Amino acid sequence: MSEGASIGEVITLLKDEFPDLTVSKVRFLEGRGLINPRRSASGYRSFSDEDVARLRYILQQQRDHFLPLKVIKSKLTMWERGEEMPVPAPAGPPPEQLFQSASQEVDRDELRRVTGLSSRQLGDLIDHRVVRPEEGKPERYSAEEVAIATQAQRLLAYGLEARHLRSVRISSERDAELLEALTAALLRAKSPEARQRAAEMLAGCADAIARIRSAALSEELRALMAAD
């Protein structure tokens, strides 16, 4: 391909590997700065072997790893500079471990009995949205809410109040928003493979965030105990 290939020839070359590749897709990737074929004297795109290899890599990253273009572009930039490529993220816990919801729900009275919360304490936790009923079921609480209420009871026993615990729940909401933005493209996809990849990323990120928070809190408390 020493003379350079036209955009049509490139699509024909890659069609078997990427059946959905179109002229519009190639132009879109060029517009986003991921490929930069030179122009002939007459203004037509001319793809070198390196351009084709680069395009193939981009398409593989999208197809096999569902990576957003921003991430692919950063990987390409590192490759061009001869920098070390980032190590792939280690596998996190199985997504099913995070997303498998317990079918058992409890009502308000059972929640109080299981957690040892008083009616007033539980009311305060609900008012501050630390503990939340199931959507559309104002008096039913999931297994996750039971776990939250149980740990909230421990903190209340130490002297904290429901209003203090609101910040803990808000922190989790912000984490969820961050991960939603990270996996937005995958979550919008209809293919089972994309949904599975999103689930794996969410589970891995949730596990990593929980570990960071635990380690950071331990470090802060250790410094507190060591202070004169």
Image (tube, rainbow, N blue to C red):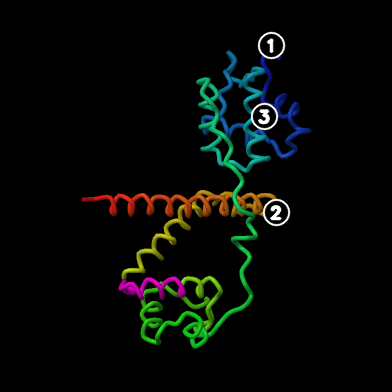
Left or right: 146, with 154 as reference point: right
Crowding at dot 3, Cα within 10 Å, few <14 / some 14-19 / many 20+, comes out as: some
Crowding at dot 1, Cα within 10 Å, few <14 / some 14-19 / many 20+, comes out as: few
Q: Is residue 119 above or below residue 179?
A: below
Quarter of the image that includes the N terminus:
top right
Residue ID for mark 2: 192
Task: Residue 167 in the image: state x and y as whole percent.
Answer: 35, 64
Sequence order check, earlier mark of 2 and 3? 3
Q: Residue furthest right?
A: 16
The circle drawn on residue 199 is none
- Between the residue at mark 1 and the residue at mark 2, the CA separation in whole angstroms equals 40 Å
Which of these two is toward me, 203 or 65? 203
Q: Amino acid at mark 1?
A: Ser
Most common SS among magenta residues: helix
Q: Secondary structure at mark 2?
A: helix
Q: Secondary structure at mark 1?
A: loop
Residue ID for mark 1: 2
